[in-house]
Amino acid sequence: MAVYTRLGAEEMAGIIAAFGVGTLVSAKGIAEGVSNSNWLIETQADDGAARRFILTVYESRTEIADLPFFLDLLDHLAARGAPVPRTMHDREGASHRLHRTPEGDKALALIEFLPGVSVSQPTPGQARAVGGALAQIHLAAADFPGSRANSLALPAWQQLLRDCGRDGLESIHPDLGRLVERELALLAQGWPEDLPRGVIHADLFPDNVLMLGDRVTGLIDFYFACTDLFAYDVAVTHAAWCFTPDGTQFLPALSEALLQGYLAVRPLEATEQAALPLLARGAAVRFLSTRAYDWLNTPADALVTPKDPMAFARRLEFYADPAHAGIFA
Ligand SMILES: Nc1ncnc2c1ncn2[C@@H]1O[C@H](COP(=O)(O)OP(=O)(O)OP(=O)(O)O)[C@@H](O)[C@H]1O
Ligand SMILES: N[C@@H](CCO)C(=O)O
């Protein structure tokens, strides 16, 4: 249950009143999500119309200083027709507010509610649509003035995996220390820096995409968005969508459809295409590193269950196998 912050009814009504979006009718805590606290908010506007929003209270993993980048980016992308939620601005025009809680001041934002559901077993048609939506945001952000360094790039993966320690990694799986050592050396040697870059989502998993049938109705959770290689974002999305969740099976029809969907909107340069096998190994290491760290450092009585790092070790082995070199061709 990801509602870490308790808000009383009067407190909630006061928060919503500051945004001028009508009178609070209901506020229901949302169980999904692990980083922040989220509520589905219903209000009644002055003309009697019912309106829905998502209220997010940012918890310790999201830096308040990054919020203008994340929230302005949503407004920028939505204004260019990309399927992302707009932010509601308060009566003073601010996209986020600070709210006093017993644990200290926390930032919060009110975000447009979008219809749709996160699919758990995507079809090729859905993967194609997601590839297209990813390319759409890469293009739509081209004139976005903000930038943000990727705080989860190779140096962070190296640090997280060092913090896990070889013993820690081998307590997860006896072969994990060796795999990580081999892959980090390869990535450090060959990571490309001179490919096209811009604003990327960097975490476009199925749970961050809302869909109705084959249509993408919402890309959400931009809290890892940053300035980095577009082709790396394609690799992240590939790792997230084209395997069974446990990483034991590659799903070739989803892979082909996702890549076709992307290419139909933004063709990849030859250098980007050539880099995809290595970028995919990097994407697998990215999620392996955060998951392994959380696996070893989450207390047993924590509210959230850590995600399985081996699901991304399996993807990594798949991408590293020369027999699979052709999947990005
Ligand atoms: N704009 C939106 N419209 C509709 N539903 C939304 C919207 N934003 C979030 N949700 C719902 O709230 C849930 C939690 O949101 P989100 O994934 O952003 O939480 P989080 O804790 O910040 O993320 P994470 O778990 O990836 O760290 C989503 O799974 C989705 O069901
Ligand atoms: N999408 C990530 C969690 C957020 O970074 C994962 O599945 O490990």
Image (cartoon, helix red, strand yellow):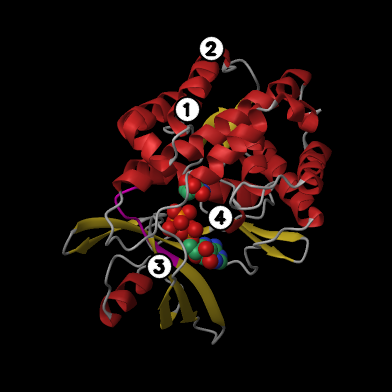
Give the quadrant of residue 83.
bottom right
Place of residue 158 in the rendered image (x, y in percent of width and height, measured from the top left): 40, 25
Residue at x 71% of width, y 23% of height: 272
Q: In this view of the protein, which residue sits in the foreground, 61 or 163?
A: 163
Q: Which residue is mark 2?
A: 189
Q: Amino acid at mark 3?
A: Phe
- Tag of residue 19: 3
Label 4 beta carbon less than 8 Å to ligand 1: yes
Residue 120: % across, % down: 64, 62
Name the front one of labels 4 and 1: 1
Q: Earlier in the sequence, mark 3 or mark 4?
A: 3
Kindly identify the amino acid type of the residue bearing the numbered disc 1: Val
Q: Which residues are magenta?
A: 55-61
Which secondary structure lies at badge 1?
helix
Left/right of residue 198 with respect to residue 165 in the rendered view: right
Helix, strand or loop at mark 4: loop
Q: Which residue is mark 4?
A: 220
Quadrant occupied by the N terminus: bottom left
The residue under label 4 is which amino acid type? Answer: Ile
Are the residues flagged by discs 2 and 3 in contact, CB closer than 8 Å? Answer: no
**Mark 2 secondary-structure assignment:** helix
